[in-house]
């Protein structure tokens, strides 16, 4: 299989994939795909009673992504909806909708189109197993559910959202179970993925491990 210039970063929610992917994209000036944001956008737009085809059209025409040094901003019709997409309610709806075959198929081409020949960092659940199974470098990032709940707690608190730690741990474990036991594209590491457990590692330490892998593969 011909390998393409993609780095896939898969893993469960709040494993640090988002921060790592942004750090890599910014440091190396690579393109970034946050596939979870597409599922969240799908959930957000389905609340507005659009049909599946209309949602795909809305995402293609009216959504744009803007990576600054801190975060990936998501604009819909020129409004910044990043915080609206990062709520636990949208995350739960996105997780539910992501088990529907038609939804995954509709988002498949949009995700594939993020690859334009330049190096792409693709963050998600099935980047290395399905969408970019032909990627040159695959990372599977994981961490304990307690540690991931702690990280999500801080993230939501920083956004000024109400959070409850026991509820957050329960939500994360429920979502893990759904994401890894669904029939279509379940969450699991690709055969050729490098597995990194970040429970006891800082973002800098995880970045340094991946930086070495990137230097070997791409530079
Ligand atoms: O990474 P995230 O929390 O933003 O993702 C939100 C939901 O979208 C997640 O619970 C499952 C789904 N998802 C998916 O099924 N496949 C992906 N590649 C990315 C996300």
Image (tube, grey):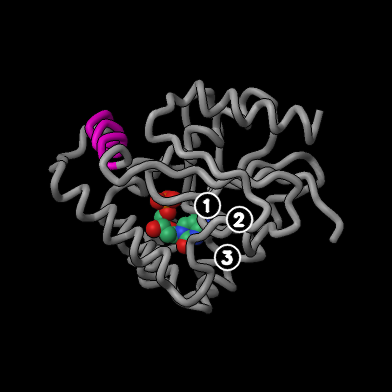
Figure label count: 3
- Across and down, in percent, residue 56 comes to 55, 66
Foreground: disc 3 or disc 2 = 2
Q: Can residue 73 be seen here?
A: no
Q: CA distance from mark 1 to mark 3?
A: 12 Å
Judging by the rendered image, the residue that carries numbered circle 1 is: 124
Q: Residue furthest right?
A: 2
Where on the picture, by quarter, is residue 181? bottom left
Q: Is residue 133 left or right of residue 95?
A: right
Mark 1 and ligand 1: say if the CB distance to the nearest ligand atom is below 8 Å.
yes
Q: Residues within 10 Å of mark 1 (few under 14, many from 20)?
A: many
104 to 169, vertically: above or below = below
Q: Which residues are magenta?
A: 149-158
Q: Quadrant of ligand 1?
A: bottom left
Judging by the rendered image, the residue that carries numbered circle 3 is: 107
Q: Is residue 61 left or right of residue 168?
A: right
Judging by the rendered image, the residue that carries numbered circle 2 is: 127
CB within 8 Å, label 2 to label 1: yes
147 to 123, vertically: above or below = above
Sequence-wise, the earlier of marks 1 and 3 is 3
């Amino acid at each position: 299989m011909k390998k393409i210039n993609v780095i896939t970063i898969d893993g469960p929610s709040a494993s640090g994939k988002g921060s790592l992917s942004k750090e890599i994209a910014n440091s190396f000036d690579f393109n970034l795909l946050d596939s979870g944001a597409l599922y969240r956008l799908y959930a957000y737009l389905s609340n507005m009673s659009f049909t599946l085809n209309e949602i795909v059209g809305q995402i293609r025409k009216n959504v744009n992504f803007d990576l600054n040094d801190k975060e990936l901003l998501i604009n819909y019709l020129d409004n910044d909806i990043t915080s609206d997409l990062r709520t636990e309610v949208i995350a739960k709806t996105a997780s539910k909708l992501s088990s529907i075959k038609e939804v995954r198929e509709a988002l498949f081409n949009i995700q594939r189109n993020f690859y334009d020949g330049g190096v792409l960092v693709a963050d998600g659940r099935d980047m290395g197993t399905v969408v970019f199974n032909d990627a040159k470098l695959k990372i599977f990032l994981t961490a304990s559910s307690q540690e991931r709940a702690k990280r999500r707690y801080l993230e939501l608190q920083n956004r000024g959202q109400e959070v409850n730690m026991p509820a957050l741990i329960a939500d994360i474990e429920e979502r893990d179970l759904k994401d890894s036991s669904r029939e279509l594209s379940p969450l699991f590491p690709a055969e050729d993925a490098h597995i990194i457990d970040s429970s006891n590692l800082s973002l800098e330490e995880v970045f340094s491990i991946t930086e070495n892998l990137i230097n070997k593969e791409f530079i």
